[in-house]
Image (cartoon, rainbow, N blue to C red):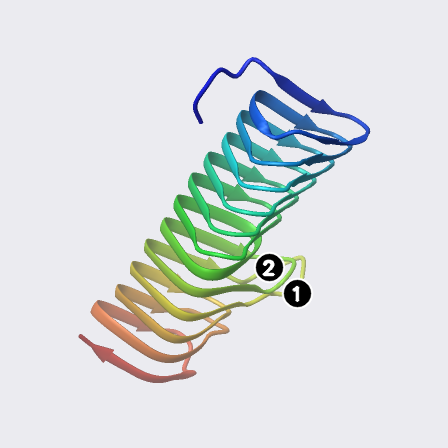
């Protein structure tokens, strides 16, 4: 994100606008950006579409935003829906809706109360998911602290599906996985795990595990 950013883009109705460098972007209607977008701050309360890649320092979506290519950001806050056509890289992410990425996703912290669909590796330092609204999926999940909770007092519990989940401290509920590997692993209710490998501690509150061994 280089160059001067003195421009502001404000979309209230409907229209298509050029890509480029902006200080602030605000979409309350239906707005399309026809190329790459670079912005310090972007807020979408309507429906936005970036037909390229995006580099946004602070991103807040309470409506729906689709980015055709990759997204890089410092902070993302999703109350609605974010769709990324390629990879996602951010420092922190708060999702109270849905996050979809067609490629890998890399974050230092990701807290979710809703759902995610990552068609690749979800690499995150701290991952906390409270599954709500729809099933979640990732090909692989890797991180330091991974906590997945599936219980809800107000709605039907959802599930998380992954091929591999690997981390230091892992707690899982309502999760289906072929392999879970970590230092301290706790399997809670509603899980279907084929194999667990652990280095320090293993707690199993759900008996649907085919194999568990210390490594």
Q: Specify the quadrant that holds the N terminus.
A: top left
Residue 25 percent coordinates (x, y): 63, 25
Mark 1, secondary structure of its residue: loop
Q: Which residue is mark 1?
A: 156
Distance, label 1 to label 2, CA atoms, is 7 Å
Q: Which residue is mark 2?
A: 152
Residue 119 percent coordinates (x, y): 50, 62
Q: How many marks?
A: 2
* Horizontal relation, residue 207 to residue 8: left or right: left
**Mark 1 surroundings within 10 Å by alpha-carbon count, few (fewer than 14), some (14 through 19), many (20 or more):** few
Task: Evaluate if marks 1 and 2 touch, with contact meaning CB atoms under 8 Å apart.
Answer: yes
Q: Is residue 147 above or below residue 29?
A: below
Q: Is residue 18 above or below residue 128?
A: above
Mark 2, secondary structure of its residue: loop
Q: Is residue 180 above or below residue 18?
A: below
Residue 65 percent coordinates (x, y): 65, 42
Residue pictured at 46% horizontal, 19% vertical: 3
* Horizontal relation, residue 161 to residue 31: left or right: left
Instruction: Kindly indicate the quadrant of the structure image that contains residue 197.
Output: bottom left
Instruction: Kindly indicate the quadrant of the structure image that contains residue 166.
Output: bottom left
């Amino acid at each position: 994100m280089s160059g001067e950013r003195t421009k502001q883009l404000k979309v209230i109705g409907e229209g298509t606008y050029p890509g480029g460098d902006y200080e602030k972007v605000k979409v309350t209607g239906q707005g399309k950006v026809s190329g790459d977008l670079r912005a310090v701050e972007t807020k979408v309360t309507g429906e936005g579409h970036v037909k390229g890649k995006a580099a946004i320092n602070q991103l807040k979506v309470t409506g729906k935003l689709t980015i055709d290519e990759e997204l890089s950001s410092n902070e993302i806050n999703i109350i609605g829906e974010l769709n990324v056509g390629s990879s996602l890289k951010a420092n922190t992410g708060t999702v109270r809706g849905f996050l979809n990425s067609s490629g890998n996703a890399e974050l230092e912290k990701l807290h979710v109360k809703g759902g995610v669909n990552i068609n690749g590796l979800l690499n995150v330092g701290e991952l906390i998911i409270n599954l709500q609204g729809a099933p979640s999926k990732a090909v692989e999940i890797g991180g330091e602290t991974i906590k997945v909770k599936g219980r809800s007092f107000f709605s039907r519990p959802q599930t998380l599906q992954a091929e591999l989940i690997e981390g230091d401290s892992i707690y899982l509920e309502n999760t289906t996985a072929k392999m879970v590997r970590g230092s301290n692993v706790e399997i809670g209710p509603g899980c279907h795990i084929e194999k667990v490998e652990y280095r320090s501690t293993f707690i199993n509150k759900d008996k649907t595990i085919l194999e568990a061994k210390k490594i």
